[in-house]
Amino acid sequence: MSDSAQLTPSKAANTILRWIRVASGETAAYTDLDMVREGLPGTPYGEGVKIIKPPMASPVRSSEGMLVCNPNDPTEWGIFVNEDASPERRRFTIAHELGHFVLHRAKRRTFNCDKAAVHLSLESAGLIEREADDFASNLLMPGDVLRERITSQDIDLHLLSGLAKTFGVSFEALCIRFIKYTDKRAILLHWDNGFLKYEWRSRSAVLSNARIRRLSDPVEPLRDTVAADPTIAQEWNGIEMSAAVWCVGEQPYMKLQEFKHSYGVRDRVLTLLILEDAEPRRWDNSWSDEESYDSFDKFASSG
């Protein structure tokens, strides 16, 4: 498409979702990626392309996903995925590569995305990798459906886990999408081997200057929190405590709910904090310089 360089990931994904809904006659929560892949060549986003072949196992062990053009036939493209990844991760990778197809194929003919580039959107991975992740998130977790499912609901990890299954994505991907979409003051923390790997803050959390206390470098879970309690592996219903336990500048009377999800080997932990509402602190303009609301794009990962 001649003007694809001007497309935003969300606009492209939402346009494709509208096409799917018109074709199927329904608004489905689960996005059929085969329908997207097969239908793109017949749209302006697939101009000049006859076919995107079904995903195949990647021949490169270090590759999480690849999008390649047949060197002998520029109308034919193919997707490769890491066959050892979970079904949810493979699904996100396919959507990520379709994002490259829609947004970036005019720039190059081959995209080889390692594990740090797909799903993590590392700053060092470059703008196009972050855009492909953003496209995938919008395509797989439609914003209108997500908003409908979380509006006026009591948020807990049971609800978010159910939504992840509905969308066919990982629990972590859903939690990140929730943080981006919610009007609540919310913070998502990912701990790896006991240290903070990344932090996501919702817009409301940023505007109210909600920040976690950092008493060590690298950052470890704070005392008297669920995250620091090794006897609690899962806390899906949330435990209420003073917001001041976790966050700098919060008054002791302000409350938050702390949720915790530990993965199988328990060296990876997700903490979700949902704080009581508060007015934006208009005297603090530090948030206005932040393009995103997190440190997710700023960490280094071994993949």
Image (cartoon, rainbow, N blue to C red):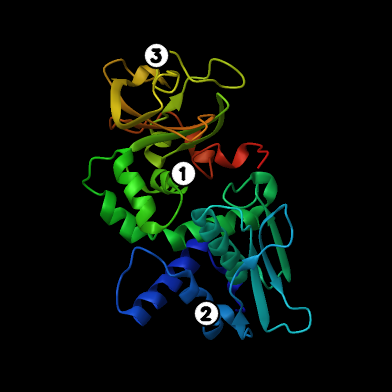
Name which residue type carries label 3. Asp
* Amino acid type, label 1: Glu
Q: Is residue 182 visible?
A: no
Asked whether residue 137 is in view, the answer is yes
Comes first in the chain, label 1 or label 3: 1
* Residue 38: assigned label: 2
> Could you say which quadrant of the image residue 281 lies in?
top left
Residue 99 placement, left or right of 187: right
Residue 19: image location, x then y, percent: 41, 77
Classed neighbour count for the residue bearing mark 3: other residues with Cα under 10 Å, few (<14), some (14–19), many (≥20)? few
Q: Which residue is mark 1?
A: 172
- First reached walking from the N terminus: tag 2 or tag 1: 2
Up the image or down, 99 lies above or below 297; here it is: below
**x, y percentage for residue 23?**
37, 81
The part of the image, by quadrant, that contains residue 45 is bottom right
Instruction: For the C terminus, give its image quadrant.
Output: top right
The residue positioned 42% from the left and 57% from the top of the image is 168
Q: Which residue is mark 3?
A: 224
At label 2, the amino acid type is Glu
Q: Position of residue 51 (x, y in %)?
A: 61, 82
Q: Quadrant of the N terminus?
A: bottom right
Q: Secondary structure at mark 2?
A: helix
Residue 219 is situated, as x and y percent measured from the top left of the image, at 56, 22
In this picture, residue 66 sits left or right of residue 22 = right
